[in-house]
Image (spheres, rainbow, N blue to C red):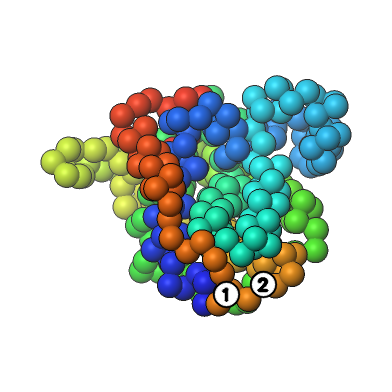
Amino acid sequence: MLVLYKPHIDFITNHAVDPDMRRYAVAQEGARHYIDIDHYGQYPFNALPRKWDDARVKFSSDSLQDHGIVPWWVQTMLYRLTGAFKEKNQVKILKLSAEIGHYIADAHVPLHANSNHNGQYTNQQGIHGFWESRVPELLADKEWDFFIGNADYIKDPGNFIWQRVLESAAAADTVLRYEKELSEQFPPDQKFSFENRNGIVVRQYSAAFTKAYDLKLKGMVERRMRMAIYSVASFWYTAWVNAGQPDLTKLSNKEFSADDLKEFENLSNNWKNSKIIGREHEE
Ligand SMILES: [Zn+2]
């Protein structure tokens, strides 16, 4: 699959954020990035049917939308990506690969599987961006290893993504509790630091606090990121296999159309100019 993905790695990287930008333009978009699974009781949340149709009958789709639909949306995207491989449509394959990657990665983030997603109920506002941006930005380049072995074929993608969501849900407690415990040990002036970013002074978690948190989490952020990379690669591979393993050197529709380019431009304009529709989340 490298013949396809390697030359387009910049496209994939740049467009992996499109789903987040779309939250500024499309009301239904937000729900695709998370699931407040604690809404459905206690781990492992057996009150919530894993199949969309069963869940819809039990809770109604409006209510499911209200609490987030990421595990189902990943499966919808897999279906679309498989279709794009069947069509041998390169533009579609690349767009959908970038986007499914985003949703899969979100499903690996503990605070995307918990209603207290930014610590708003426990006076820990900012913890969402702390876990998923500040920690990796400080540590990933220098200390973490993202070399992942081969992708695998996923026999049951529904079950696979639910397992990842359940892991995220189980980890959310720890993510929140450890930040709280550590905050009690750090005086406020050592918990936060001030940094000049493009002429604006911003308050952020200090390097010392960030490192202490990562140590206490015993590498959880890196582990989840490694798992996310493996999952994305395996979903891409699975879509390709399920499409009948089309020859990737013989794809059609390799140029972005005027409509594609317009769509990219609109997404980024909406993002720059407007407020988010639906609920906030950090990245
Ligand atoms: Zn997202």
| Residue drawn where x is 83% and y is 35% of the image | 53
Most distant residue in the left direction: 199
Determine the CA span between mark 1 and mark 2.
8 Å
**Mark 1: which secondary structure?**
loop
Q: Residue at x 66, y 28 (%)?
A: 65
Other-residue count near label 2 (Cα within 10 Å), few / some / many at <14 / 14–19 / ≥20: some
Q: Nearer the viewer, residue 67 or 77?
A: 77
The residue where tag 1 is placed is 250
Q: Could you say which disc has been placed on residue 246 in the image?
A: 2
Which of 158 and 116 lies nearest the eye of the viewer? 158
Of 4 and 254, nearer the camera is 254
Proximity of marks 1 and 2: CB atoms separated by less than 8 Å = yes
Q: Nearer the viewer, mark 1 or mark 2?
A: 1
The image quarter containing residue 127 is top left
- The answer to whether residue 165 of the structure is visible from this angle is no
Tell me: residue 115, above or below residue 15: above
Give the quadrant of the C terminus. Answer: top left
Disc 2 residue type (three-letter): Pro
- Name the quadrant of the N terminus: bottom right
